[in-house]
Image (spheres, rainbow, N blue to C red):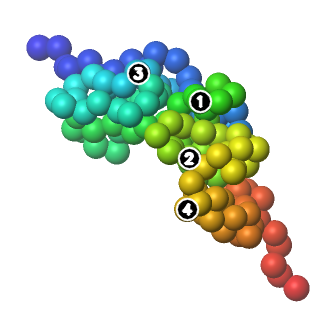
């Protein structure tokens, strides 16, 4: 008997802000092997590599609804508020967002960004 075939990557997703790259197996709103899941946005999806369950998947990212850049779902790159927005577009149009989004963005600005591999040497 043949072993079940694993989902083959369709292409490679790349976040245009942080550079995250990952192979995706599906782009759209209804990932394969899911019963009744419909995503609220067209997104890049891959099978969850951490489980043998075919129904599990990871959402990698989507396109910013304003500038169309490919952005990952990471909190330092984008946010979802009825549509996906990259953070540069959110900041440029901050007054158009509800007050709670504006306050959240102001809190984010106050926190230092933590990019992996760019840690400061704290030894003295």
Q: Earlier in the sequence, mark 1 or mark 4?
A: 1
- Residue underneath mark 2: 79
Number of the front mark, 1 or 4: 4
Q: Earlier in the sequence, mark 4 or mark 2?
A: 2
Q: Earlier in the sequence, mark 3 or mark 1?
A: 3
Q: Earlier in the sequence, mark 2 or mark 1?
A: 1
Q: Secondary structure at mark 1?
A: loop
Q: Horizontal and vertical percent for residue 20?
A: 63, 38
Q: What distance separates the C-alpha of mark 3 from that of mark 1? A: 15 Å
Residue at x-position 19% and y-position 31%: 36
Q: Earlier in the sequence, mark 2 or mark 3?
A: 3
Q: What distance separates the C-alpha of mark 1 from that of mark 4? A: 20 Å
Taking 41 as reference, is 19 left or right?
A: right
- Residue underneath mark 4: 100
- Residue underneath mark 3: 28
- Residue underneath mark 1: 65
């Amino acid at each position: 008997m043949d072993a079940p075939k694993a989902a083959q990557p369709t292409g490679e997703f790349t976040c245009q802000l942080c550079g995250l790259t990952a192979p995706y197996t599906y782009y759209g709103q209804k990932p394969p092997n899911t019963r009744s899941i419909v995503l609220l946005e067209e997104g890049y999806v891959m099978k969850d590599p951490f489980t043998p369950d075919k129904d599990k998947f990871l959402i990698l990212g989507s396109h910013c609804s304003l500038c169309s850049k490919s952005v990952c779902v990471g909190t330092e790159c984008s946010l979802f508020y009825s549509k996906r927005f990259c953070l540069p577009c959110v900041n440029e149009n901050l007054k158009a967002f509800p007050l709670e989004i504006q306050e959240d963005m102001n809190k984010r600005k106050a926190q230092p960004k933590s990019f992996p591999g760019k840690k400061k040497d704290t030894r003295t």
